Image (spheres, rainbow, N blue to C red):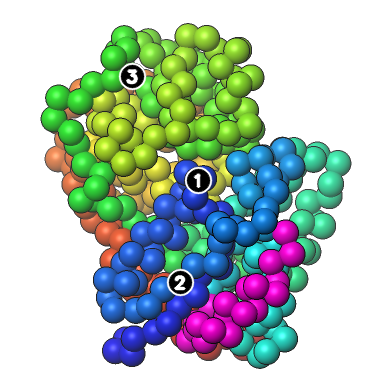
């Protein structure tokens, strides 16, 4: 793709949140800029916003449409990508439809599972209907894996395109001599501390050594009280996060709801084997169908058994190491996927 594009990325998920969506969009912008494209973000930053009910760390911009419309008019983007379904996403969608501007979307969060975990009386089909309405006009709806693409197609979504995830292997790397100051072996979780992440299944396991949680969220206080032997380090970024990965023995990913799990690749790039359930997300990143994955990850319906298997992998010298596995999954390939997706014609079906 020779043309240099002006690309507007609209996202309700943004700093100071620390999660896979924010990191994905930050790295995407950096890589697009490195390729010569002009990137701007429309985020809650600098706008009047309120915390999302049940998840105050997520800020929702209030009545953002007028200012956003001016920003779109002034920037005159060649491509608009709506990354989230919040108030900014809804406003951008309405503006694009009003002026006949084509836009793409992406599906990062399994909202039906999110809503079910918090509001069990809300019918899932209502959420799916809303999602079909939101993403329906997009020229491309991007999903992270082929499995998720098939699932979304079964739910009636169209114009589906793969936009995979990568890892910055220059930033995430083993740190020689790094070691968290706790009794080993150290089992590490990194991510949002929220009910849909299923962290309690990890914390309740009978494992040797120490369980460490890096991240923040609405469930942190109650989990800290319930599991006083676990170590909660709060949100980390930059070198402290890399050192936390490098200073642990096994990365534990207890979620059943993630569409990908970017932290899986970050942990692998820092040299950690992975323990997880064999569900969508981890199965797509380190499932048995992927060459070498069995040497860097243990997937099991019994998460405790997966943790012990991953610990055994950490103590062996396999031909494929977690680091070498991660090196095959670069961000540049993912950015080029994104660029192809934002100029595709919609499917006819």
Name the residue: 72% across, 59% down: 62
Q: Which residues are magenta?
A: 62-80
* Residue, disc 1: 16
Callout 1: SS:
loop
Neighbor class of circle 1 (other Cα within 10 Å; few <14, some 14-19, many 20+) is few
Determine whether, in the image, residue 168 is placed left or right of residue 284.
left
Asked whether the residues under the numbered discs 2 and 3 touch, taking CB atoms below 8 Å apart as contact, a structural biologist would say no
Q: Quadrant of the C terminus?
A: bottom right
Of label 2 and label 1, which has the lower sequence position? 1
Above or below for 13 versus 141: above
Direction from residue 318 to residue 195 in the image, left or right: right
**Is residue 229 covered in magenta?**
no
Residue at mark 3: 186
Q: CA distance from mark 2 to mark 3?
A: 40 Å
Residue that label 2 marks: 40
Q: Quadrant of the N terminus?
A: bottom left
Q: CA distance from mark 1 to mark 3?
A: 27 Å
Depth order, front residue of 103/348: 103
Q: CA distance from mark 2 to mark 1?
A: 18 Å
Note whether 126 is above or below 322 in the view shown. below
Residue 26: quarter of image:
bottom left
Percent coordinates x, y for residue 99 in the rendering: 68, 89
Q: Residue 89 in the image: x percent, y percent?
A: 65, 66
Magenta stretch: includes residue 63:
yes
On residue 217, the disc is none
């Amino acid at each position: 793709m020779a043309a240099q594009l002006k690309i507007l990325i609209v996202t309700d998920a943004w700093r100071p949140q620390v999660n896979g969506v924010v990191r994905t969009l930050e790295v995407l912008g950096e890589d697009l800029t490195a390729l010569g494209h002009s990137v701007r973000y429309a985020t809650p930053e600098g706008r009047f916003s309120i915390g999302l009910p049940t998840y105050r760390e997520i800020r929702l911009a209030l009545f953002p449409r007028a200012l956003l419309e001016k920003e779109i008019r002034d920037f005159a983007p060649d491509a608009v990508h709506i990354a989230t379904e919040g108030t900014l996403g809804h406003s951008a969608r309405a503006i694009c439809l009003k002026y006949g501007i084509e836009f793409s979307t992406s599906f990062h969060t399994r909202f039906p599972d999110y809503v079910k975990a918090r509001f069990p009386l809300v019918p899932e089909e209502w959420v799916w209907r809303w999602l079909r309405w939101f993403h329906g006009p997009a020229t491309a709806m991007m999903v992270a894996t082929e499995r998720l693409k098939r699932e979304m197609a079964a739910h009636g979504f169209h114009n589906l395109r793969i936009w995979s995830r990568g890892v910055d292997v220059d930033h995430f790397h083993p740190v020689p001599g790094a070691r968290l100051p706790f009794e080993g072996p150290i089992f590490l979780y990194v991510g949002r501390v929220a009910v849909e992440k299923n962290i309690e299944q990890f914390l309740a396991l009978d494992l040797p050594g120490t369980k460490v949680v890096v991240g923040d969220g609405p469930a942190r206080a109650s989990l800290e009280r319930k599991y006083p032997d676990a170590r909660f380090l709060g949100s980390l970024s930059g070198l402290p996060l890399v050192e936390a990965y490098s200073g642990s023995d096994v990365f534990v990913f207890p979620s059943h709801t993630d569409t990908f799990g970017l932290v899986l690749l970050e942990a692998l790039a820092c040299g950690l084997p992975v323990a997880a359930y064999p569900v969508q997300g981890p199965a797509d990143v380190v499932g048995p169908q992927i060459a070498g994955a069995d040497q860097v990850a243990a997937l099991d319906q019994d998460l405790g058994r997966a943790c012990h298997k991953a610990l055994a992998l950490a103590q062996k010298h396999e031909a494929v190491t977690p680091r070498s596995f991660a090196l095959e999954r670069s961000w540049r390939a993912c950015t080029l996927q994104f660029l192809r997706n934002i100029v595709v014609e919609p499917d006819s079906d």
